[in-house]
Image: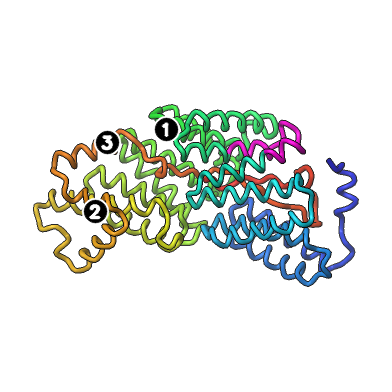
């Protein structure tokens, strides 16, 4: 590990005004990223990139850092193809310039794993996280925060694979490191409490889950003064799913609304997190028998995911299934002809059936079968409906500017998690 004194000597002002401005832009970009101000962060990174790209060929390492952080921003904005491209370019540069066990390569693998996770490729995510962890365990102390971040994200991937005991093991390892490194009242510690809550909820322990979510929320509300940080929205969203699972529909809608208000302030209208909240609200409306409201928010969610994933994401089919289910229940409730008599709705249902074969079967179920289906849904929670947003990311701060609280040039900031 390079000593702090050596780093401070090496990474001081360059004496070149243009490069010093570049360093300032890069550091300011990191600050905006930490605050969840993604558009501002991207603007600063782009300015830094423009300066570095004019260099004499000795700045590849700096460009890799910029690519990495731009990739993180794109991931947070839901632009996963762009995110993958930038992070992959960073890894490509670092593999040519650095030793195979360099921490920057571990960070690149970690972030690529996070993108795979967001794209629904959980097996691919675990492969990348495992590669990152092997490097970190070789070059870092056992209680280094960076190791906690990778444990955390591995836990999230295990959750999606329904391997809940493995997930809890990873989260506990992450929490123990974070408590030692950061203490109780740190946003990163809050994220792990949130994720432990997710596992409890998926195991049907909603009261325990809500206790963990509340721990997370209280820490985050104290950490971010304006109360508009994406992580707060994520925790509200998860609380809403737990309330829904308990049949507490008013509480579920109230906390979903809190989540949505924050998301609409900090994200674009087509961000996947907003789709997640619309799905949750649709689930509540469906349980309440408010089928028209459910259809409206489900369609908003489907529109966002179609825009982001171009029709290729595992969540899109279940949304269409729910829309068809709502139309069916609505027609039975109102004792009116089904929406298939409308040209617009007929086209919509044709599209839904093409994407989700199970939706067609739903239309042919008897009333008793339909009631049984709804009862099953009340008793369980689909893992994809819980917002695994609290993954941890690895921000690269290896470009020449100011030293941040990191070892070996790795700046450890927290992901939006999964």
Q: Earlier in the sequence, mark 2 or mark 3?
A: 2
- Above-or-below relation of 44 to 384: below
Measured in 3D between alpha carbons, the distance from the residue under mark 2 to the one under mark 3, in whole angstroms, is 17 Å
* Residue 89 part of the magenta segment: no
Residue 76 placed where, x, y %?
Answer: 55, 55
Q: Which labelled disc corresponds to residue 324? A: 2
Disc number for residue 410:
none
Q: Residue under label 3, please give it.
A: 376
Q: Quick check: 33 left or right of 60?
A: left
Residue 157: in sight, yes or no? yes
Q: Element under label 1?
A: helix
Q: Residue at x 56, y 35 (%)?
A: 192
Judged by depth in the image, the label closer to the viewer, 1 or 3, is 3
Looking at the picture, how far across and down is residue 126, in whole percent? Answer: 57, 42
For residue 2, above or below residue 67: above
Is residue 294 at all visible to an observer of this figure? no
Any magenta on residue 141?
yes
The residue at the point 71 percent across, 52 percent down is 396
243 to the left or right of 52: left
Residue at image point 72% right, 66% down: 49
The image shows residue 332 at horizontal and vertical percentages of 12, 49
Q: Residues within 10 Å of mark 2 (few under 14, many from 20)?
A: many
The region drawn magenta spans 134-152
Vertical comparison of 17 with 105: above or below:
below
Q: Main secondary structure of the magenta part?
A: helix
Horizontal side, residue 210 vs residue 46: left or right = left
Q: Nearer the viewer, mark 1 or mark 2?
A: 2
Q: Foreground residue, 263 or 174?
A: 174
Q: Earlier in the sequence, mark 1 or mark 3?
A: 1
Q: Examine the rendered structure and indicate whether residue 151 appears above or below residue 355.
A: above
The label number, if any, that marks residue 201 in the structure image: 1
């Amino acid at each position: 590990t390079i000593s702090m004194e050596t780093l401070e000597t090496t990474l001081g002002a360059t004496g070149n005004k243009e490069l010093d401005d570049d360093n300032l832009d890069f550091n300011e970009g990191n600050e905006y990223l930490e605050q969840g101000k993604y558009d501002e962060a991207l603007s600063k990174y782009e300015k830094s990139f423009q300066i570095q790209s004019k260099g004499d060929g000795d700045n590849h390492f700096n460009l890799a850092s910029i690519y990495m952080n731009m990739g993180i921003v794109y991931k947070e904005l839901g632009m996963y193809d762009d995110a993958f491209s930038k992070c992959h370019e960073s890894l490509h540069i670092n593999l040519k310039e650095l030793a195979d066990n360099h921490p920057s390569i571990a960070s690149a693998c970690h972030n690529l794993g996070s993108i795979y996770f967001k794209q629904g490729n959980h097996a691919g995510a675990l492969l990348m996280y495992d590669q990152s962890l092997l490097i970190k365990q070789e070059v870092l102390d056992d209680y280094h925060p960076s190791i906690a971040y990778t444990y955390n994200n591995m836990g999230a991937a295990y959750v999606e694979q329904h391997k809940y005991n493995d997930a809890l093991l990873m989260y506990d390892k992450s929490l123990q490191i974070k408590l030692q490194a950061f203490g109780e009242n740190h946003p990163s510690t809050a994220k792990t409490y949130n994720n432990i809550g997710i596992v409890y909820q998926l195991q049907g322990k909603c009261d325990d889950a809500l206790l963990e979510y509340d721990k997370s929320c209280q820490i985050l509300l104290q950490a971010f003064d304006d109360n508009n940080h994406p992580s707060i929205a994520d925790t509200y969203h998860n609380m809403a799913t737990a309330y829904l699972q308990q049949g507490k529909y008013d509480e579920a809608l109230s906390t979903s609304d809190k989540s949505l208000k924050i998301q609409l302030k900090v994200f674009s209208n087509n961000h996947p997190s907003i789709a997640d909240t619309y799905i949750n609200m649709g689930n509540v409306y469906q349980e309440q028998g408010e089928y028209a409201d459910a259809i409206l928010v489900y369609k908003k969610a489907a529109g966002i995911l179609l825009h982001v994933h171009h029709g290729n994401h595992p969540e899109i089919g279940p949304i269409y299934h729910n829309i068809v289910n709502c139309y069916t229940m609505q027609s039975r409730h109102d004792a009116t002809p089904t929406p298939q008599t409308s040209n617009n709705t007929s086209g919509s249902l044709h599209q839904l059936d093409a994407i989700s074969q199970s939706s067609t079967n739903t239309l042919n179920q008897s009333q008793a079968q339909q009631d049984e289906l709804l009862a099953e849904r009340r008793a369980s929670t689909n893992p994809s409906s819980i917002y695994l947003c609290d993954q941890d990311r690895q921000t690269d701060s290896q470009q020449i500017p100011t030293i941040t609280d990191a070892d070996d040039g790795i700046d450890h900031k927290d992901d939006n998690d999964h």
